Amino acid sequence: MSAGFSRRRFAGGAASLLGLAALGSTAQARAPGKLTPADFMPVLTGLDHPEGIAATPEHSLYFSSGGGALGIRAPGGAIRYIGEAIAPNGVAIDREGRAIVANMGLLKGRPGTLQRIDPRTGTVETLVAELEGRPLAASNGPVAARDGTLYCTHSTWGPVANIGTTAATGFIYRVTPDGCADIVARNLRGVNGLCLDREERWLTPR
């Protein structure tokens, strides 16, 4: 896989997505880009700092909040939490159906680790705690490739004031299926979300 990088701006954020779900019939009837507020409804409220969200093929929602390392909303609406929250931020789902959770520890004076959480067993693992001899501080937006490789943004080493400013101290790191981690792109300013294109040829941060 080659990794190309381009800047892209999006309206809204992951936290706003967590409180909304498209109403199927009207949303599917319109062409992309024609959605209106009437096509959405709240599905979950009252969360402690929600940020990341990912949907499973079984229609469960994995989300981040202060309630646990991972929150899960079942299709029927039941909510459960797994593990202790560090500073959960972005959420992705790997090819085994496990949640990948990035911790933005810098905002809470806590570690910025990347975790893997198995909803079936409740197992919480730390995948990456440091890179190049430095503890991670601000893991932000993870994404999982079909070959099992994980990528994650890291907004800055710190301090908090550097996030999103002119200080280009952010980067993107990779975790291979055998557990090896390395930095694949450096000198990014306030890097946040991350996505792969359909063919997984391009890795695009924002």
Image (spheres, rainbow, N blue to C red):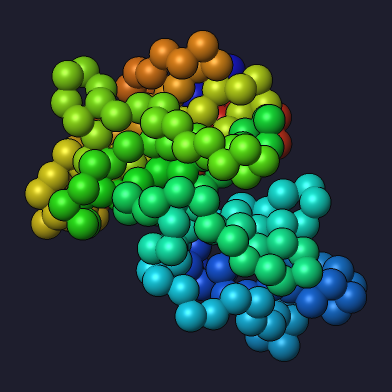
Q: In the image, residue 10 lies at what x, y percent?
A: 49, 61
Q: Position of residue 199 (x, y in %)?
A: 70, 29
Q: Against 132, is 16 above or below?
A: below
In the rendered image, the quadrant that contains the N terminus is top right
Query: In the current view of this chain or complex, which residue is farthest to the bottom?
Result: 38
Question: Vertically, is 95 above or below 100?
Answer: above
Is residue 16 something that shows in the picture?
A: yes
Q: Residue at x 17, y 19 (%)?
A: 133
Q: Residue 96, position in %: x, y?
A: 68, 30
Q: Quadrant of residue 161?
A: bottom left
Q: Give whichever of 146, 33 is nearer the camera.
A: 146
The answer to whether 200 appears left or right of 100 in the picture is: right
**Residue at the image point whose x is 71% and y is 71% from the top:** 77
Q: Residue at x 43, y 36 (%)?
A: 115
Query: Count of labels shown?
Result: 0
Residue at screen point 45% across, 32% down:
125
Q: Does 99 appear above or below 165?
A: above
Front residue of this view, candidates 108 and 203: 108
